Amino acid sequence: MIYITRRENFNSAHKLSRPEWSDEKNVEVFGKCANTNWHGHNFNLFVTVKGIPSAETGFVIDLKVLSSIIKENIIEKLDHKNLNLDVDFMKGIMPSTENLAIKIWDELEPLLKVHDCQLHSIRLHETENNSVEYFGQ
Ligand code: NI
């Protein structure tokens, strides 16, 4: 089994807040991410898949194919969008980096199965210092 990773980038706006909480409590819990009029992050997404290299090509998956799957199904939906308002698979979900990584997994996992490889992890960097990693459970 070998693991390969494709990196993609996107920029999105969001706001972390609970409408039933006071402004003070939202700021206390979510800090700058509670800003009323939104703010943005430059996200770096690392998608790792695993499998056995093909006897013919030596590839687990053609990285051009992997990149296209990620771009068409994830990046086009997230890039320059508002995670609270614009993204079908984030509707009704607190748009934290944790939840975004889980939902990206849920979108990609079935699409990669048909390519004879398995999704291994979603690593999502919200800032240089903050990132999350999800392995499907
Ligand atoms: Ni934020």
Image: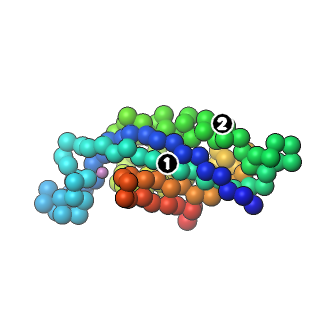
User: Which label's residue is closer to the chain start, 1 or 2?
Assistant: 1
Disc 1 target residue: 45
For the C terminus, the image quarter is bottom right
Classify residue 61 as left or right of residue 75.
right
With 106 as the anchor, is 29 left or right in this view? Answer: left
Identify residue type, mark 2.
Lys
Identify which residue is drawn at 30% across, 43% down: 40
Q: CA distance from mark 1 to mark 2?
A: 16 Å
Q: Position of residue 110 (x, y in %)?
A: 64, 48
Q: Is residue 23 above or below residue 111?
A: below
Residue at the right extreme of this rendering: 55
Q: Does residue 22 appear in this view?
A: no
Q: Residue 72 in the image: state x and y as whole percent.
A: 56, 34
- On residue 105, the disc is none
Residue 105 falls left or right of residue 22: right
Q: Is residue 79 visible?
A: yes
Res. 64 image quadrant: top right
Q: Which residue is mark 2?
A: 64
| For residue 98, side relative to residue 5 (left or right) | left
Residue at left offset 43%, top offset 53%:
125
Q: Does the numbered disc 1 mark a residue whose Cβ is under 8 Å from ligand 1?
A: no
Q: Secondary structure at mark 1?
A: strand
Local secondary structure at mark 2: helix
Question: Which of the pair 22/96 is nearer the observer?
Answer: 96
